[in-house]
Image (cartoon, coloured by chain):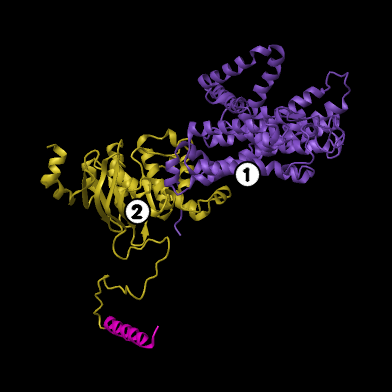
Amino acid sequence: MNTPPSSVILPVKGPLLTRVGLGAFIVALLLVCALAPMLNLLVPESSMFHMSTYAVALLGKIMCYAIVALAMDLIWGYTGILSLGHGLFFALGGYAMGMYLMRQIGRDGNYKSDLPDFMVFLDWKELPWHWTFSDSFAATLFLIVLVPGLVAFVFGYFAFRSRIKGVYFSIITQAMTFAAMLLFFRNETGFGGNNGFTDFKRILDTPIATPTMRMGLFVITGLTLLGFFLFAKWLVRSKFGRVLQAIRDAETRVMFSGYNPIGYKLTIWTLSAVMCGIAGALYVPQVGIINPSEMSPANSIEMAIWAAVGGRATLIGPILGAFIVNGAKSWLTVAYPEYWLYFLGMLFIAVTLFLPNGVVGLVKKLRKGGEK
Amino acid sequence: MTPDLLEQGAARIEKRLAALEAGKSNTESGGRNASTGRIATPGEVDVTHGRILYLEDVSVSFDGFKAINKLSLDIAPGELRCIIGPNGAGKTTMMDIITGKTRPDEGTVFFGSTIDLLRHTEPQIAQLGIGRKFQKPTVFEPLTVFENLELALKTNKGVKSSMFFKLDSAQSDRLAEILVTIHLADSVSRMAGNLSHGQKQWLEIGMLLMQDPKLLLLDEPVAGMTDEETARTAELFLTLKGKHSLMVVEHDMSFIRTISEIVTVLCDGSVLAQGTLDQVQADERVIEVYLGR
């Protein structure tokens, strides 16, 4: 065998997280698993360090959004496919969980029936076929992954095989989520119509509204977010991740290098949808409601804004973006409710014009400027 | 099979073996035992007939415009063929057809004597061993030189194997070897987007070499290169000749003079003339299409 020319030093792949990154990750892990539960459950309410139930609920919700933003980053930031239909996958995961939670109400509903209230109201006598597995928590967990994954796979297969790209793909995904919303709005599809599912009482036969249960869901959401972050990091650093970026920038070159882009796009598209579905399933028990408005086109567009504000193709950026935008949203919708949508629109324009690489891009730029 | 047919067959093989021993083995397939020996292996390029690429009577039209018109062309293994021709002669379209990007309306395109290229998709054709460099250099700009080459490496290109891919030592050696060949060893960790135009051209050639192709299609490989870079590229192509077959489309005549053996002139979608550069330059028809009529 030839000895390699000694002058060439090939770069060595670094560890998954840098030392700073690892430090930050451990801090985040401690915040989620130790500090937040302590401040919420152990510190008395009178203390200024007490973390209110409102804060727990808000942060838990935003962490779900952060998972969605991460999923958006994989498909949009890294692969260059802008989906404006991720709200559908989020809602599908949410509805799968919601069905289980509806069944957990048992006979405690307004009508004291075995069936969920809205079915009694519609004068239905038995559960529709698609509620067959709603009794089992294990089956629900399975469906949370399977349903969004399957819908995404089938949709993606036909779209990518027909080489639908760019803005056409975005428009079709937008139409897909809109169509699904209209479908879910109808009472006869068996998803509670425009009211959706609410009034949840229990999960795993334990009351859902207790502080401990809330904290438990909060911790699980935080761990899921951190886990997905590590997974996404591993994925984009593998050769698979580099092929995705290559598809984004020069798809023809990728094909002429012997890769079939369909398989790659379909894999990341389905993975991204599954992540969204899981986020939706964690969201529903924490906010206590799921209805078809989650599938509204505006919701899906907002998801893209989180990723854009934070900085595409950075992983950490979209997570920050979800926190920044939703933090601002929860403050503004209380303080100046009528201005929220103007603010969101302006934010999107400002980011597109002045911060094409989002907040993370800005930080990088400032840091570089500081070094010089 | 009936016994008398078996006997006849045995007699024929005996006769053939006797002829082989006597040294009178000049059959039509160049002295090889065509009838009794070779087995076609799927995916392997069969060049025993002395041709790696055949195009026969290929035509394609776009909205009524015949970009390629009854084009027939063939290339021998290890040959370096230069293609010249005025703008719109169909040079790039021909490459599109060979690599599966454009489907011809009629005609046949074979890689070796067994692989029908019209039945394969772009990624499959690339895997079979045809590499292509575009007119405008296309490298993956946000990736480093190293990552660009690693992506192009000939290996299993499925989704799962990409997720768990690790460069082994033989592959690292090959990568290092090519980095030296394309004079980018010092830029291994630089972003491809920050390279000069000539360096991008080379990186793209390097990516082709990583694929270890049997046939390289190079569309204007020295466009935008300095004289020194052009000279180095000529040198590189001459070392590749023999090991790989090359088809080079260029406008730079001095570059073609340095590297060419046979030059094919395309005009209006078919072959106008073929021969050494001096021969085609002396051809009346070639002078006419180049100087205008």
Residue nearer the viewer, B239 or A344 = A344
Give the residue type at disc 1. Leu
Q: Nearer the viewer, mark 2 or mark 1?
A: 1
Foreground: A252 or B260?
A252
Q: Which mark is residue B139?
A: none
Image vertical order of residue A372 relative to residue A263, above or below? above
Chain of the residue that carries numbered disc 2 in the rendered image: B
Quarter occupied by residue A58: top right
Dot 1: what SS? helix
Q: Is residue B7 magenta?
A: yes
Q: Which residue is mark 1?
A: A150
Q: Which residues are magenta?
A: B1-21
Which part of the image, by quadrant, shows the N terminus of chain B? Answer: bottom left
Chain A: give its colour: purple
Residue B139: image location, x then y, percent? 42, 39
Q: Nearer the viewer, residue A156 or B46?
A: A156
On the rendered structure, is B70 left or right of A323? Answer: left
Q: Main secondary structure of the magenta part?
A: helix
Q: At 42% across and 42% down in the image, what residue appears?
A: A253
- In the image, taking residue A97 as reference, residue B92 lies left or right, namely left
Q: Are marks 2 and 1 on the same chain?
A: no
Q: Which residue, given by chain and number where applicable, does mark 2 sit on?
A: B215
**Colour yellow, chain:** B
Q: In this view of the protein, can residue A85 be seen by the observer?
A: yes
Q: Residues within 10 Å of mark 2 (few under 14, many from 20)?
A: many
